[in-house]
Image (tube, rainbow, N blue to C red):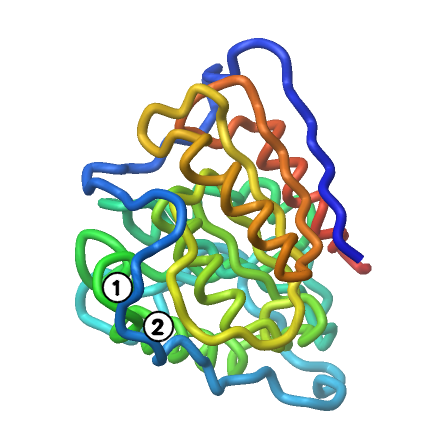
Amino acid sequence: MRTRRRFLLAGARLAAGALLAGCAVPEREGRAPDRRRGGAELAVRPPTGAPEPGAEPVTPGDRPLGLVAERDPVLHVPPGLVPGRAAPLLVSLHGAGGSAAAGLALLQPLADEHGLLVVAPASRGATWDAVRDGYGPDADLIGRALETVFAMVPVDPERIAVAGFSDGASYALGLGLANGELFGRIVAFSPGFVPPGGRTGRPEVFVSHGDADDVLPVDRTSRRIVPSLEDDGYDVTYREFAGGHTVPPEIARAAVDWLGWKTGG
């Protein structure tokens, strides 16, 4: 069933604490031109079956995954995980010119409240591969990062999502829609377009955008993306707010609440 829930938030939302990730690289708007397809599908999946009882807990905090010498993906483990209990996982993608730290900052405090694992990769170039040319090294590294995380800590296969801001939001949409049997939910904060690629599954989608965004104007981006996704049969929750190219704290919280993944849930 296709639904759209629109909420207009009154007043400017550029207060301290709102996140604005780097956007030094010009970004694309609306529907993307046709370009090389394929390469977006991720074969990795979390192990099936119940986790081993009495497993040692993973120490809370941030840890590089040791996959690449530069711009290594980082895993954030929230406090309070129950040993042996499969946890929800969020893949968080930075904006253009950003880093793994920017991806973590996007939702990490809220992830701690909700008991969510967060893995934050970093693009190989100034922005994500499919934003410019097509899926390649960035998608490959995300697959390797997930494989590593799945081997380190039990992950609930029914509670895996991908999120991102700006270019990261565009990439989250493209990667998430192509891997809807892996990512049950997609969060896109101020996306520019949906990179082309195959689609599998039927993930639910959360999109937010500022009505005064002068980097990726909403008329040419989310106000086109959301109806297009709905026309394709996706369940989309849309939050448009008064403000610019940013993620206000209340929007970040609304997105995490929308996931519905509470600690112990």
In the picture of the structure, the residue carrying the numbered disc 2 is 139
Secondary-structure class at tag 1 = helix
User: Relative to 15, is 89 on the left or the right?
Assistant: right
- Against 185, residue 139 (above or below) is below
- Against 136, residue 256 (above or below) is above
Secondary-structure class at tag 2 = helix
Residue drawn at point x = 73 percent, y = 82 percent: 54
Residue drawn at point x = 57 percent, y = 45 percent: 226
> How many numbered badges does the structure rendering display?
2
Residue drawn at point x = 62 percent, y = 27 percent: 250
Q: Residues within 10 Å of mark 1 (few under 14, many from 20)?
A: some
Which quadrant of the rendered structure holds the C terminus?
bottom right
Q: Are marks 2 and 1 in contact (CB under 8 Å)?
A: yes
User: Relative to 28, is 3 on the left or the right?
Assistant: right
Q: Nearer the viewer, residue 172 or 198?
A: 198
Which quadrant of the rendered structure holds the N terminus?
bottom right
The label number, if any, that marks residue 16 in the structure image: none
**Residue 155, image x, y percentages:** 63, 74
Q: Nearer the viewer, residue 224 or 177?
A: 224
Marks 2/1: CA–CA distance: 8 Å
In the picture of the structure, the residue carrying the numbered disc 1 is 129
Q: Residues within 10 Å of mark 2 (few under 14, many from 20)?
A: many
**Residue 196, image x, y percentages:** 39, 66
**In the picture, residue 6 is in which quadrant?**
top right
User: Relative to 201, is 122 on the left or the right?
Assistant: left
Callout 2, which amino acid? Ala
Q: Nearer the viewer, residue 219 or 87?
A: 219
Callout 1, which amino acid? Asp
- Against 15, residue 188 (above or below) is below
The mark that comes first in sequence, 2 or 1, is 1
**Residue 99, image x, y percentages:** 29, 50
Residue drawn at point x = 26 percent, y = 37 percent: 23
